[in-house]
Image (cartoon, helix red, strand yellow):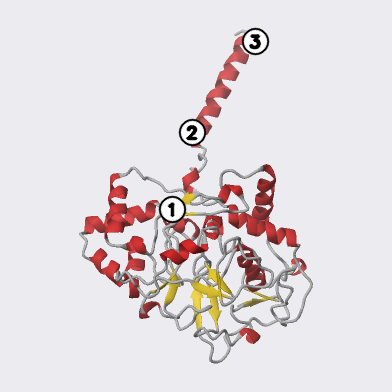
Amino acid sequence: MRKSQIIIGGIIALIVGIQACEKFEPGLPLEDSLLDGPIEGLSLSEMQRFNDGDRTFNNEVFTVEKGLGPLFVSNSCVSCHAGDGKGNPFSTLTRFGQVDETGNQFLHLGGPQLQNRAIPGYQPEVLPMGATFSRFTPPAVTGLGLLEFVPDDVLLQMADPNDLDGDGISGRVNWINIPSYIKPRSGSISQNGRYIGRFGKKASVYDLLQQTVDAFAQDMGISTLYHPIDVYSGQNADPEISTQRVNNVGFYLQTLKAPIPRNQTDSEVIKGKALFTQVNCSSCHQPKLTTGNAPISALAFKDFYPYTDLLLHDMGPGLDDGYTEGIAKTNEWRTPPLWGLGLSPNSQGGKYFLMHDGRATSIEQAIELHGGEAAASRQQYNKLSPTDKAAIIKFLKSL
């Protein structure tokens, strides 16, 4: 055999081998199966900020040398929000102290969050005698920037605290005091010096900068320029992380893409979507919202589909934990966005842990736990045929 024939044969064998191997290699995940990733339209400098925030959020493990503690809940952001998704029972937080709108009486004893871990030489916190508490499962963090820039007047238009339209739904905003370092958004509406909260289980957080600063302080015991307080001693402390990095984590949260729905042309998904509206779930889980002006052009004047009204609703005695934040009542909870619901098991260990504390291990269980203002919708759902119920569940899993 000629040398040239041997070389050609070898090349052919190599190509065939590579192609055979490619058949066994896992393909890249589809974009709609991932929560991570930036919103479209960011500039080069904005992408640099996004990537910097991404590194801190998803790759950084904080140690004592990096400012962790002395008391903390977790040593990284990603441990509570794997893949930017929901947390699970192992990352669920304990909040304690406040029973009504008079304010948290246990802030001097470590409230509102229990730091259940400590670095060597320190003892973790325990619940103070007489404190009321609730368990909060960490939420998914995608699409939050779109929620941040929905104008206040839109939220107030959706609110109906006295149920003037008689539909049994009486959502309201949570008027909160904001930290001194927060600059209210353009167009923000205030009432007696308070502003509208929209993040957190009780809508007790104003914006994503506050959410970020609170997480560094309460979750990891890391002081910042915005909150230069040692959580353990309550005394002033030097910042343990640069302000730029804090800002970039906030920017990362603002510019994460919204979850991408799947299977939207499936006939059962289309049927389930119609039934979702028919049983009036969409009264609180508003399908469509629109942002107003925003300092990040990619977020300005955008239509999006989160399935929330960001309002507080009475969810009945079964979900009343006896603890609250801001002026919310103990039985009131902010409507959680439903987008990304079908991807939740990816970050929750292969199964669901839903509602504010993860007590529901399926979407069906979560529906059954809806009381108060949502009781009528739950009853209408229960009257549906098994096939109609399955269509609604399939629709919800497509979000």
Chain-order first, disc 3 or disc 2? 3
Q: Residue at x 30, y 69 (%)?
A: 167
User: On the image, which quarter does residue 145 sit in?
Assistant: bottom right
Which residue is the site of mark 2?
Answer: 23
Mark 1 falls on what kind of element?
Answer: loop
* Residue that protrudes farthest toward the right in the picture: 238
Tell me where residue 162 appears, x and y as whole percent.
37, 75
The alpha-carbon separation of the residues under discs 2 and 1 comes to 37 Å
Mark 2 falls on what kind of element?
Answer: helix
The disc at residue 305 is 1
The disc at residue 196 is none
Q: Quadrant of the N terminus?
A: top right
Tell me where residue 350 appears, x and y as whole percent.
44, 58
* Residue that protrudes farthest toward the bottom in the picture: 129
Task: Give the crowd class for mark 2: few <14, some 14-19, many >=20 residues within 10 Å.
Answer: few
Q: Can the viewer see residue 287?
A: yes
- In this picture, is 36 found above or below 185? above
Chain-order first, disc 3 or disc 1? 3
User: On the image, which quarter does residue 218 sit in?
Assistant: bottom right
Which residue is the site of mark 3?
Answer: 3
- In this picture, is 195 found above or below 292? below
Tell me where residue 113 appears, x and y as whole percent.
59, 78
The alpha-carbon separation of the residues under discs 3 and 2 comes to 31 Å
Residue type, mark 1 in image: Tyr
> Would you say the residues marked 2 and 1 are in contact, meaning their CB atoms lie under 8 Å apart?
no
Residue type, mark 2 in image: Lys
